[in-house]
Image (cartoon, rainbow, N blue to C red):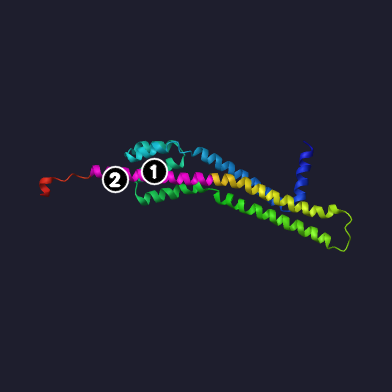
């Protein structure tokens, strides 16, 4: 146990200055991934089929009851449709209301996937520059470890950047797939609500009297 901090600090020192921004990105990535995992666990869409059936049959009270009992984005979306009417304008406003929660932190995760390898490459360049400065110096190099330190910095920072990027990429792709699936469910709920609205309008419309029409 006592050797772990020194080993960690030695690794950070070997990787050069780029290791500290990479460490910060890794901490941010872990935090965002945990938050998204918790969000999608709470927004599994367990009652989507029930909500769609209720909207299709015009059971507004049931939809509002489900929406009131859950913080699920699907239930929230369906509740807005049931409360304000299933018009295209209301559906668009409801989608705008729930979309930020679905896409939250996705830009941050995407940025980490892109930035981490670039920081690793920056550490690589800095390490190679240090090595060439030693080779091109006026003093003769008697210890090969002086040159290998710069090469080690290049390799460690590159590897660290790739590890951070890859460990963020896979959760990011999984979350993006979940977001696309959630958007598809919202569209299905909007279609069910529109179908229920059309059915209700047809029922309320007065039947034409054949005698009067003649």
State the SS at label 2.
Answer: helix
The reply to whether residue 80 is in sight is no
The reply to whether residue 117 is in sight is yes
Residue appearing at x 63%, y 49% in the figure: 165
State the SS at label 1.
Answer: helix
Give the residue at mark 1: 189
Q: Nearer the viewer, residue 112 or 155?
A: 155
Residue appearing at x 82%, y 55% in the figure: 147
Q: Nearer the viewer, residue 180 or 46?
A: 180
Q: Nearer the viewer, residue 56 or 144?
A: 144
Residue appearing at x 66%, y 55% in the figure: 118
Residue 5 part of the magenta-drawn span:
no
Is disc 1 in contact with disc 2, using a CB cutoff of under 8 Å?
A: no
Q: Give the quadrant of the N terminus.
A: top right
Crowding at mark 2 (Cα within 10 Å: few <14, some 14-19, many 20+): some
- Residue 150 drawn at (x, y percent): 79, 54
Q: How many marks?
A: 2
Q: Which residues are magenta?
A: 175-204
Q: Nearer the viewer, residue 25 or 160?
A: 160
- Residue 87 drawn at (x, y percent): 34, 49
- Residue 85 drawn at (x, y percent): 34, 46
Residue appearing at x 69%, y 48% in the figure: 23
Q: Earlier in the sequence, mark 1 or mark 2?
A: 1
Residue 195 part of the magenta-drawn span:
yes
Give the residue at mark 2: 198
Question: Which numbered dot is residue 74?
Answer: none
> Whole-Å distance between the Cαs marked 1 and 2?
14 Å
Crowding at mark 1 (Cα within 10 Å: few <14, some 14-19, many 20+): many
Task: State the predominant SS element of the stretch in magenta.
Answer: helix
Q: Is residue 54 left or right of residue 207?
A: right
Residue 205, compared with residue 18, is above or below; it is: above
Q: Is residue 79 left or right of residue 120?
A: left
């Amino acid at each position: 146990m006592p050797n772990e901090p020194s080993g960690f600090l030695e690794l950070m020192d070997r990787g050069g200055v780029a290791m500290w921004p990479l460490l910060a990105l890794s901490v941010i990535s872990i935090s965002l991934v945990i938050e998204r995992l918790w969000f999608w666990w709470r927004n599994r869409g367990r009652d989507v089929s029930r909500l769609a059936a209720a909207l299709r049959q015009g059971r507004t009270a049931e939809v509002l009851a489900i929406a009131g009992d859950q913080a699920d984005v699907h239930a929230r979306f369906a509740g807005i449709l049931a409360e304000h009417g299933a018009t295209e304008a209301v559906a668009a406003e409801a989608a705008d209301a729930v979309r930020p929660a679905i896409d939250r932190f996705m830009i941050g995760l995407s940025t980490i996937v892109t930035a981490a390898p670039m920081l690793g490459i920056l550490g690589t360049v800095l390490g190679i520059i240090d090595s060439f400065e030693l080779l091109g110096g006026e003093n003769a190099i008697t210890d090969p470890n002086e040159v290998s330190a710069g090469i080690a910095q290049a390799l460690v920072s590159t590897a660290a950047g790739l590890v951070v990027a890859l460990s963020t990429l896979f959760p990011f792709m999984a979350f993006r797939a979940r977001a696309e699936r959630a958007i598809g469910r919202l569209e299905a709920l909007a279609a069910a609500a529109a179908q229920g609205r059309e059915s209700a309008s047809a029922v309320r419309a007065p039947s034409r009297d054949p005698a009067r029409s003649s």
